[in-house]
Image (tube, helix red, strand yellow):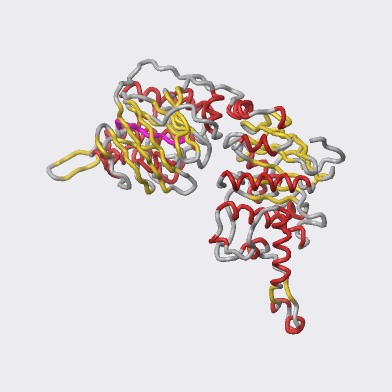
Amino acid sequence: MENKGLPLLEMKGISKDFFGNQVLSDINFTLYPGEILGLVGENGAGKSTLMKILFGMEEIHATGGYGGDILIDGEKVVFKSSEDALKAGIGMVHQEFSLLPEFTVAENILFNREPEKYSVVSELFGKRLNTIDRKELQRRALKAIEKLGVSLDENKYIKDLPVGHKQFTEIARELSKEDDGKAGESGIRLLVLDEPTAVLSEHEAEALLKAMKMLSKAGIAIIFISHRLHEIIDVCDSIMVMRDGLIIKQVDAKDADVAKIASWMVGRTVSTERIERGKDVREDKDILKVSHLKVNMPGEMVKDVSFTVKKGEIFGIGGLAGQGKIGIPNGIMGLYGAKGEVEFDGAAVKLNAPRVPLDASMAFVSEDRRGVGLLLDESLEWNIAFSAMQIQNKFLKKIGFVKFRDNEAIKKVTEDYIAQLEIRCTSSRQKAKELSGGNQQKVCLAKAFALEPKLLFVSEPTRGIDIGAKALVLKALRNYNEQFGTTIVMVSSELEELRSICDRIAIVQDGMINGILDASTPSEEFGLLMVGDVKKGGGK
C-alpha cells in the first residue's frame, strides 16, 4: 500500500535480554495508519517479546526493561503498563482466550467497563449502588461487532459459542474500548493479533481476514502474527520476518510467496553442521509403530499421529509450537492421557500406564527438566542412578534378602558421565539445582543413558542452553546411538538441530504428521510442511 503522512508507530533500535541471554537485537520498523503488517518467524524468534515490549507488559519491566525507543505519531513514548498502551490506542488479542464462559458476548465485550445507570439512591449513598445500563451495554457491544462486519449474537453465552465466535468476541472487546475513554480520544488505532486463526476453521478464518481488511480501511493498523503464510500474503500489505532475535527480511507482501517466507523463517545465521555417522547401526527392522495416536496434553493437539521407526535410527519430530510434537512422547510414555496403538519391538505397549514403557526398555528425557526430569534437591549421583535403581535394580548390593545401595558403583557411573558429557560441577555429590541449565540437561541425559534403553525419547534436548552445550548434547546422542545401537526419537523446535543428527524427520502440523522427509532434504521443504503446505511425504 502507499503510505502517506506521519507513521503511527516506529520502533527504533529495540533490544532485550533476559538475564544475559540476548533475545532481541536492533529491531527497527515503521507502521502507518491502516497498514496490515505480517509478523512471521519460528517459535523463539522473538516475536512475542517484541509485542510485549510494545504493549508495556509487566514481564518486560520486571526483567530490566528494554533498549531503544518507541514512537507514536513521531513522539517518544514509554509504556509502563498495558493500560498506558491502551490509552495510546494499542489493543492486543492473545492466543489464549480470556473470556468468561457463563457471561454473554455483550457482557464479555464490556466486562469491567460496563456503563452504569444512576438513580436517586446512588446519588444519595454513592455510585456503588449504581446498576448496569443494559441498553447502553447492548448498544456499545453491537457497535464493536458491527466494526468487525461479522454475524455475532451479543446475547449468546460464551460457553455456547464455536471457537471462531469466541475469537471475534475477543477482538470486539478491544474495538469497544474507544467508547469508554480507556483508549484515548481516538480509540483503538493499532491492533495486535497473535495467531488469531490458529484455532479457526477455514470458513471462520476467511471471515476474520475479511474483518481485518474492513478495520484497515477504517484506518486501524494491524500487526498480524501467524504461521499460516498464505493468510499473511493474502491480507497483509507488508511482511517482516524474524529469526534469532533479528529482523531478517522486510518486504511488500506482493513480492513474497510461501516458499520464500518459509526459507527466510527456517534459515540460520550460523548453520548447524551435520554430525555424520561414524558407524551405521541401523537395521531394516521396525522397532516402533505408532498408529492413530491421540494425546490429551494441555497446549498440544495430537489428533491422529501414525509413524514407524527403524531399529538403530535417529528419528526426528519437528513442527511449530502447539501443533502436537511434544505431546507424542508424553502420551506414549504415559505422562498424559492417550488413545491409539503403540507397538514396540514386536509387542503392544499399554497406554496410560507409565511403568509399562519403562519395563519394555524405553526411556524419556522430558522437555520439562526441572519439573519432570530432575530431583533438584538431590545430588548428581542420586539423580543419575535413581531411575535405574528403581526400575532395573541396578546399583544395589544384596546381602541375604536385604538390598543396599552400592554407593561405589553409583559414584563411579556418575563420575563416568560427568567426564563423558563434560558436566561442570564441583563434585558428583553437588545438588542438581545448583547447576546451570545446560549442565542440568546433561544430567537428564546421563540419567536416561544409565537405563541403557533400547529406545530413547528426547524432547527439546537443547532448549535454553548455550551453543557450546548444544553441540555437546547432540554429539552425546549420536555417540550413544552408535555405541549401543540405541534407537532415538528426538523432538525439537530447532529444525537445523534435527537435520544435524537425524536420519529422517517427521513434521507435525495440526495434530497430524504432515510429512516425513530425509534429513538431507532442503530446509525450505520442511518449512513448507510446518506451515501447512501440501503433504510432501507419508506417515510411515
For residue 61, above or below residue 497: below
x, y percent for residue 398:
17, 40
Residue drawn at (57%, 64%) of the image: 157
Please count the marks in the image: 0
One can see residue 22 in this view: no
Q: What residue occupies the far top of the structure in this picture?
A: 278
Instruction: Judge whether residue 330 is colored magenta.
Output: no
In the image, 388: left or right of 517? left
Quarter of the rendering occupied by the N terminus:
top right
Q: Nearer the viewer, residue 368 or 204?
A: 204
One can see residue 170 in this view: yes
Instruction: Judge whether residue 457 is colored magenta.
Output: yes
x, y percent for residue 274:
48, 19
Q: Which residues are magenta?
A: 453-460
Quadrant for residue 257, please give it. Answer: top right
x, y percent for residue 102:
55, 65
Q: Nearer the viewer, residue 448 or 340?
A: 340
For residue 191, above or below residue 107: above
Quadrant for residue 524, please give it. Answer: top right
Quarter of the rendering occupied by the C terminus:
top left
For residue 84, above or below residue 367: below
Residue drawn at (72%, 58%) of the image: 144
Q: Main secondary structure of the magenta part?
A: strand
In the image, 153: left or right of 321? right
Q: What residue occupies the far right of the structure in this picture?
A: 5
x, y percent for residue 251:
72, 29
Q: Nearer the viewer, residue 493 or 525?
A: 525
Residue drawn at (43%, 27%) of the image: 422
Quadrant for residue 455, please give it. Answer: top left
